[in-house]
C-alpha cells in the first residue's frame, strides 16, 4: 500500500507544478501533462483506497488517516468532473494543492493507522461520505471565488494584466460558485445531521465542544447565509465570491484546530 501512496503523491505533486507552470507561461503541453498526471494519480489513489478497504473490511473513512486520504480522492474526482464540464484549465492551480496537502498529511498519519471498526459504522459512513462530497464541492468554489475576485479587481482598476486573458469570465466563475454551493451546502447539512446521530449512537449524547462542533456550525452558517442569500436576495458576483472564500477558509481553520 505504501508504494501506491508514494506514486499517487508523486503524480499529484508534479501535476500541481505543471498546473502552476501552465498558469504562468500558457503552454498547452503543460496542461496536457498536468491533466494526464492528475488522472493517473487518481487511478492509483483509487487503487490505494480499495486496498485499504480490503485490508480493514470497511470503507476508507473511519480513521483520521483514511479521512484525509478519502477527502483528497473525492476532491480530485469533483475537480476532474468540473474540468470536463467547464473546460477551465486554471482551476487545477487552486484545487490540486489542497488535494495534495490532504493526501500528504494522510501519508504522515498512515504509520499510526488502525484497522478497528468504530461504533455506529453505518451512520459514520453516511456522515463522512456526505460531508466529504459536500466539502470537496465547496473547495471548487474556493478556487473559483479567488479567480472571480482577481478578475473583477482587474476590470475595476481598468488595468488588465496577464491573468485577465487567462482566467475564465466572471459569468462562468459565478455560475460555478452557484452550482457548487447549491450542491455542497445541502450535502454538508445532511452530513452534519447524520454526524449528530452517529455521535449520539456512539456516546449516548451530543457534545457541543469547540473543536468538533462549534467551528463546523460557524462554517455551515457562512455557506447557509450565502445559499439562502442567493435564493432570497439574489446575491451573486463579488459578494458571493467573498462568502465562498471565507467559508472555505473557515473549513481549513476548523480542520487545523481539530488536528491540534
Image (cartoon, rainbow, N blue to C red):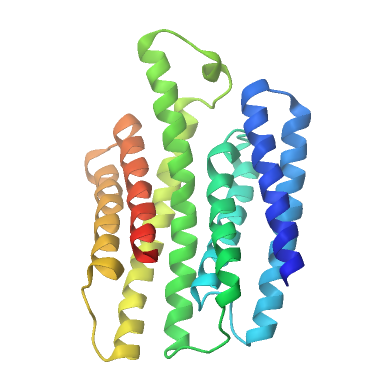
Quarter of the image for residue 246 reads top left
Report the residue at 35% width, 31% height from top: 237
Q: Position of residue 162 (x, y in %)?
A: 55, 15
Query: Count of labels shown?
Result: 0
Query: Image check: 41 left or right of 211?
Result: right
- 227 and 130: which is toward the camera: 130
Q: Is residue 74 above or below residue 10?
A: below
Q: Position of residue 109 (x, y in %)?
A: 55, 69
127 sits left or right of 193 in the view: right
**Residue pictured at 73% horizontal, 72% vertical:** 1
Q: Position of residue 205 (x, y in %)?
A: 23, 87
Left or right: 185 with respect to 62? left
**Residue at left 43%, top 34%?**
146
Residue 56, quarter of picture: bottom right
Comparing 168 with 209, the one in front is 209
Please determine whether, in this image, residue 32 is positioned above or below residue 215: above
Which quadrant is the C terminus positioned in?
bottom left
Is 61 drawn above or below residue 20 in the view shown? below
Amino acid at each position: 500500500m505504501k508504494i501506491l501512496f508514494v506514486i499517487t503523491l508523486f503524480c499529484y505533486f508534479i501535476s500541481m507544478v505543471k498546473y502552476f507552470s501552465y498558469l504562468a507561461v500558457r503552454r498547452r503541453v503543460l496542461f496536457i501533462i498536468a491533466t494526464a498526471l492528475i488522472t493517473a494519480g487518481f487511478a492509483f489513489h483509487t487503487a490505494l483506497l480499495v486496498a485499504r478497504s480490503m485490508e480493514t473490511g470497511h470503507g476508507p473513512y473511519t480513521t483520521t488517516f483514511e479521512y484525509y486520504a478519502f477527502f483528497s480522492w473525492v476532491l480530485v474526482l469533483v475537480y476532474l468532473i468540473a474540468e470536463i464540464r467547464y473546460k477551465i484549465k486554471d482551476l487545477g492551480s487552486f484545487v490540486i494543492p489542497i488535494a495534495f496537502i490532504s493526501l500528504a498529511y494522510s501519508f504522515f498519519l498512515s504509520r499510526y493507522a488502525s484497522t478497528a471498526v468504530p461504533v455506529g459504522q453505518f451512520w459514520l459512513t453516511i456522515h463522512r461520505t456526505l460531508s466529504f462530497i459536500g466539502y470537496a464541492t465547496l473547495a471548487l468554489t474556493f478556487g473559483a471565488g479567488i479567480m472571480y475576485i482577481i478578475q473583477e479587481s482587474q476590470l475595476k482598476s481598468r488595468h488588465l494584466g496577464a491573468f485577465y486573458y487567462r482566467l475564465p469570465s466572471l459569468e462562468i466563475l459565478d455560475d460555478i460558485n452557484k452550482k457548487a454551493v447549491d450542491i455542497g451546502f445541502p450535502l454538508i447539512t445532511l452530513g452534519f445531521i447524520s454526524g449528530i446521530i452517529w455521535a449520539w449512537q456512539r456516546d449516548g449524547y451530543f457534545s457541543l465542544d469547540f473543536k468538533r462542533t462549534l467551528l463546523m456550525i460557524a462554517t455551515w452558517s457562512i455557506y447557509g447565509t450565502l445559499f439562502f442569500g442567493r435564493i432570497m436576495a439574489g446575491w451573486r458576483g463579488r459578494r458571493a465570491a467573498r462568502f465562498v472564500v471565507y467559508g472555505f477558509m473557515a473549513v481549513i481553520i476548523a480542520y487545523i484546530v481539530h488536528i491540534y
